[in-house]
Image: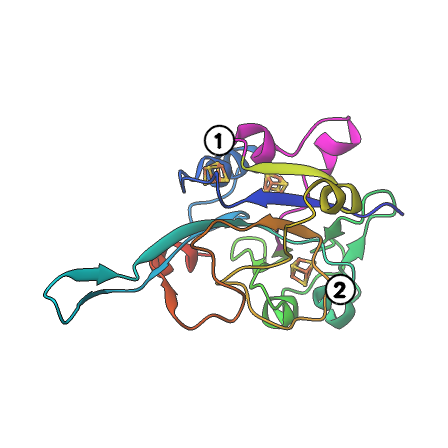
Amino acid sequence: MTQYGFYFDSTRCTGCKTCTLACKDKKDLPTNLVYRKVFDYEGGMWEQGANGTYQTTAFMYHLSLACNHCENPACLENCPTGSISKDEATGAVISGAEETCIGCGTCVQVCPYGVPAVNPDTEKSVKCDMCIDLVAAGKQPICVESCPLRALEFGPVEELRAAHPDAVDGIAPMPAGTETVPAIVIATCPAAKMPGDTEGFVANEWEVAAN
Ligand code: SF4
Ligand code: SF4
Ligand code: SF4
């Protein structure tokens, strides 16, 4: 199996959320669901020095995140009904099998990145499926296609890692120390904080919590 994944360039992303809306449109999602979220992360302050001048530690940046299609997916390993699978060809993690998913929300609780949701209308687990239909047709996921800043790339994750050797597999507000091996490659902007950071906060918490 070739594990595919996303590359996200935080030096390019303007937080426009075109990726979120293109995905929502393709997937025809209801108002209370999104599969790709853009986190606005910020922090710092202004401080007056002894000579009366002000200095700032203020920072902000954006993080566009969907399912990381992990190599060791906690969602798949903990689903009590075996309703989450990993695609043989791409490594895409697919949730909510129509026949067996009981909407218990275990995947929602165990995913370190807060990715899956239970669709209140269908009571099935839902999340990003890597646009597996487009990928099978030799195309790019719609979020990648739609980004006006070309901040997203998609491909075999080892190729993405090789093409971006300075990239990392997480920045705040992603959590530190997960064992799921996320198939994501992130270029860090100068303001970027590492996973588990406590200096900053998610400024659009109300928006990304709407899921
Ligand atoms: S990011 Fe979460 S939902 Fe996606 S594969 Fe990893 S553990 Fe599962
Ligand atoms: S790959 Fe497709 S389903 Fe996943 S976030 Fe991108 S547009 Fe949405
Ligand atoms: S479309 Fe591109 S620039 Fe806009 S929020 Fe998404 S990743 Fe960032």
Q: Is residue 80 visible?
A: no
Q: Name the spot of residue 130 as percent of width and height, x first.
A: 68, 43
Q: Is mark 2 within 8 Å of ligand 1?
A: yes
Please, which residue is most extreme toward the left here? 52
Location of residue 60 by image quarter: bottom left
The residues bearing labels 2 and 1 have C-alpha atoms spaced at a distance of 33 Å
Under mark 2, the amino acid is: Leu
Q: Is residue 144 above or below residue 11?
A: above
Q: Position of residue 62 (x, y in %)?
A: 43, 49
Q: N-terminal of the two: label 2 or label 1?
A: 2
Image x and y of residue 61, in percent? 41, 51
Q: Tell me: is circle 1 under 8 Å from ligand 3.
A: yes
Report if the CB atoms under discs 2 and 1 are less than 8 Å apart. no
Q: Which region shows up in magenta?
A: 126-150
Residue 13 sits above or below residue 101 on the image: above
Outermost residue, front direction? 51
Judge whether 30 appears above or below 173 on screen: above
**In this rendering, does residue 159 appear at all?**
yes
Three-letter code, disc 1: Leu
User: Which SS class for mark 2?
Assistant: helix
Please name the residue shown 25% across and 64% down the image.
45
Q: Position of residue 19 (x, y in %)?
A: 50, 37
Quick one: 98 or 139, which is closer to the camera?
A: 139
The residue identified by callout 2 is: 76
What residue appears at the point 71 percent right and 53 percent down from the top-left corner? Answer: 183
Tell me which corner region of the image, top left, top right, bottom left or bottom right, holds residue 135. top right
Front: mark 2 or 1: 1
Q: Quadrant of ligand 2?
A: top right
**Residue at mark 1:** 149
Q: Is residue 166 above or below residue 201?
A: above
Left or right side of 209 for 83: right
The structure residue drawn at horizontal position 63% and vertical position 64%, both measured from the top left corner, is: 103
